[in-house]
Amino acid sequence: MAVNHASVLTKDYFIAYLKLIMNSREYTLIQAKEFAFYFFFKGDRDHYDTSTWVQFEKAIKEIDKTICEIEMC
């Protein structure tokens, strides 16, 4: 997935990205989040900008909510 440093990536982008990681590597959401943090953000939440990080966090919350609904948390 190509990334343009000039734009803010969306929540939907990160939902797709995290689901791809989870499915292809058979990772949990927590593992996918950690992988993305080090691989995508290079271990720095400000690697792109604050707005992109906020969208990343929103994506994690939405996926977590979906998982919880499926599992009836």
Image (cartoon, rainbow, N blue to C red):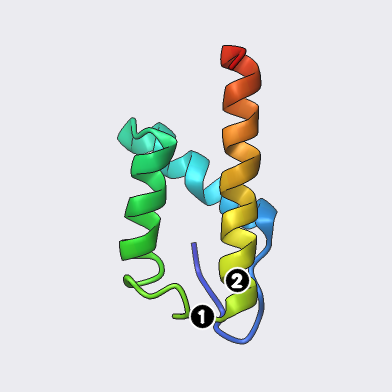
Mark 2 neighbour class, 10 Å CA radius: few under 14, some 14 to 19, many 20 or more: many
For residue 15, say whether it is visible: no
**At 66% across and 20% down in the image, what residue appears?**
69
* Rendered residue at 33%/53% (across/down): 35
Query: Is 67 displayed left or right of 32 in the figure?
Result: right
Q: Are marks 2 and 1 in contact (CB under 8 Å)?
A: yes
- Residue 8: x, y in percent? 66, 75
Residue sitting at the far front: 73
Q: Label 2 belongs to which residue? A: 52
Q: Could you tell me which residue is drawn at 55 percent across and 83 percent down?
A: 5
Determine if residue 25 is in view: yes
Residue at screen point 39% across, 45% down: 32
Query: Residue 20 location in percent, x, y?
Result: 47, 42
Q: Amino acid at mark 1?
A: Tyr
Q: Which residue is mark 1?
A: 48
The correct choice, above or below, for 48 with respect to 16 in the image is: below
Q: Quadrant of residue 36?
A: bottom left
Q: Secondary structure at mark 1?
A: loop
Give the left or right position of residue 35, taking residue 53 as reference: left
| The quarter of the displayed image where residue 21 is located | top left
In the rendered image, the residue lying farthest to the bottom is 6
